[in-house]
Amino acid sequence: MNQYNPYSDQWGNIHWGHAVSTDCVHWKILPVALKPSAERGEVHCFSGCVNTEGDQLILYYTSVGREADGRDSRYGAEQWCALSENQMESWSKYEGNPILTKEIHGSLEVLEWRDPFVWREEDGWYMVLGGQIGGSGAVLLYYSSDRLEWKFCRVLLHSSNPAERIFECPNYFALGEKRILVVSPDGMPKYWIGHEGKDHSFIPEKEGIIDHSGWDGFYAPNSFRDKDGTEETVIRYEKNADRVVIDRTRSNRSRLTDRKQLSCEEIFCEDKNLKLHIFVDYSTVEVFINDCEVISTRAYPDDEKSDEVLLRSKKARIKKLDVYSLKGANIETAENSR
């Protein structure tokens, strides 16, 4: 995907261009992925991202309209999304757009609000957006349990340097035990290395310049997660939504397999204890919840290294863990039983 003006070699009429490659060297140009919805007053489709971590491919972007309608990029930007049903070949804008408006911030005034970046954590999905607060750049954090309904969490980083008047195209991701924040402050792209604090706060420890060319050569970089070694089927409890989920979005490296998420809603946890019985074989996953609910599904990992079981939690405490290795069933055919 790329920012694209189909009518001129100058900036304006921002669409999303579209190309595909098998090796990141040789590219095939595809039809335009996004164009402004003029019937809804949209003039530009600004930058954003595509999130592939659920059972639906979702493209997030900043929608900008006419200044006369109060929808200009400084004061009236909105966050919209589009959906794909054919592996990103084409996109349809979500009927419920906008999914975020400036009113989400309450009394906090955020200007130049744009460039959504979305990723998944254990308890749901998070988004960062860039903007300006009080005349200097800021990055803001949001949360969703379904990737469509969002709530404002906090200001993640606010610059004290008046020369950094705006933060654009933020990227925020974990790298080992650290958190990395990347922004483009209308100049040379910057990074911060730090760690996550209470209530998803970001505690910077070090900062620097990614590239010294800025607008003249390198601006608005993006980050990607390497798929190697990330094949996994995740069973998680989402406390905020009170549900157990079997997440198969990365259960196989082929996108031809079924990747739907399955969930059991309104889990009753007596004394805040969650009891799970999990049965796994070559392709079957069964999760029994508190001895009264069950989710059963199939997963087809194709990586020989996909044979580990990992437990991850930031706050939960394991009271008891029993692991059993089950023997395979002894199945006889009618011919062998003679």
Image (spheres, grey):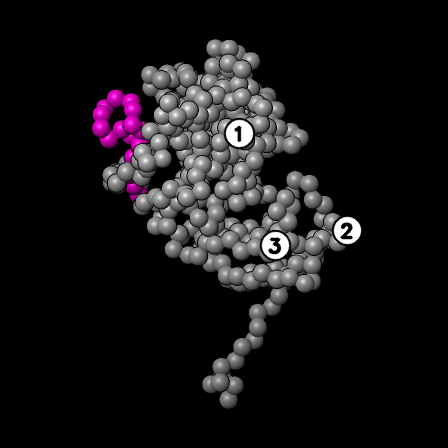
The kind of residue tagged 1 is Glu
Q: For the residues marked 1 and 3, what is the alpha-carbon distance in whole angstroms?
A: 30 Å
In this rendering, is residue 187 above or below 51? above
Q: Nearer the viewer, residue 181 or 269?
A: 269
Residue 60 image offset from top left, x and y in percent: 42, 37
| Separation of marks 2 and 1 at Cα, in angstroms | 38 Å
* Distance from the alpha carbon under mark 3 to that under mark 2: 18 Å
State which quarter of the image contains the N terminus. top left
Q: Secondary structure at mark 3?
A: strand
Q: At 40% from the left edge and 31% from the top edge, which residue is drawn?
A: 63
User: Which residue is identified by label 3?
Assistant: 265
Whole-percent x, y for residue 142 in the image: 55, 33
Find disc 2 in the rendering and name its residue. 271
The tag earlier along the polypeptide, 1 or 3, is 1
Q: Image point 56% across, 35% down: which residue?
A: 151
Q: Amino acid at mark 3?
A: Glu
Kindly identify which numbered label has been placed on residue 103.
1
Q: Which amino acid lies under the numbered mark 2 shown in the image of this protein?
A: Asp
Which quadrant would residue 219 be assigned to in this image?
Answer: top left
> Looking at the image, which is closer to me, 295 or 64?
64
- First to last magenta residue range: 1-22
